[in-house]
Amino acid sequence: MATLYELTGSFKELMEMAQDETMDQQMINDTLEGIEYEIEEKADSYAKLIKCLEGDVDAISKEIERLNNKKKTITGNISSIKKNLEKAMLVTGKTKFKTELFGFSIQKNPASVFIDQEENSPAEYWKPQKPVLDKKALGAFLKDNDVEYAHLVQTESLRIR
């Protein structure tokens, strides 16, 4: 069976032949019918492959979700275990010690800023933000209005059902 690329080339050749007045119309019709059948058959094969690959993507997505949930659970367990160890060290007063494998200590973290009244903070500590264009709202506006600074673009794509 010919490849889709070859079939497309054959179709283009046939279109050129069809423009030649000396060509037999029945031969052109028969050839066209054969090419169209092969293209449809090839399209079915492509669609089967696409559906199979989409199934793989779905399965991979579900596995990623499962592994992310497992990661989240393990991360939560690590945090709980650390908090339990820290609490035990604080309660017993044993805040710094070494074992054969590890060293343990309770230490102060760097100070972090807590804002009590954000509106009273001096302007020099505010970061200016660039405005962000709301393309969804602009798109809705452009459906009913013509402007010089933007326009809607309609594209096409293959849909297999």
Image: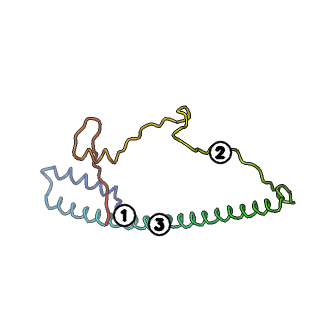
Tell me if 94 is positioned left or right of 120 in this view: right
Q: Is residue 151 above or below residue 82?
A: above
Give me the residue at 61% from left, 66% from top: 73
Q: Provide residue 19's location: percent of width, then percent of height.
A: 16, 49
- Picture colour scheme: rainbow
Q: Quadrant of the N terminus?
A: bottom left
Mark 1 or mark 3: whose residue is earlier in sequence: 1
Q: Secondary structure at mark 2?
A: loop
Q: Quadrant of the C terminus?
A: bottom left
Q: Provide residue 50's location: percent of width, then percent of height.
A: 39, 64
Mark 2 or mark 1: whose residue is earlier in sequence: 1
Report crowding for label 3: few under 14, some 14 to 19, many 20 or more residues within 10 A (C-alpha).
Answer: few
Kindly identify which residue carries mark 1.
46
Mark 3 or mark 2: whose residue is earlier in sequence: 3
Q: Is residue 38 above or below residue 110?
A: below
Q: Between tags 3 and 2, which lies in front?
A: 2
Give me the residue at 38% from left, 68% from top: 48
Give me the residue at 58% from left, 44% from top: 115
Q: Which label belongs to residue 112?
A: 2
Q: Secondary structure at mark 1?
A: helix
**Closer to the camera, 104 or 116?**
116
Kindly identify which residue carries mark 3.
56
Tell me if 45 is positioned left or right of 106 in this view: left
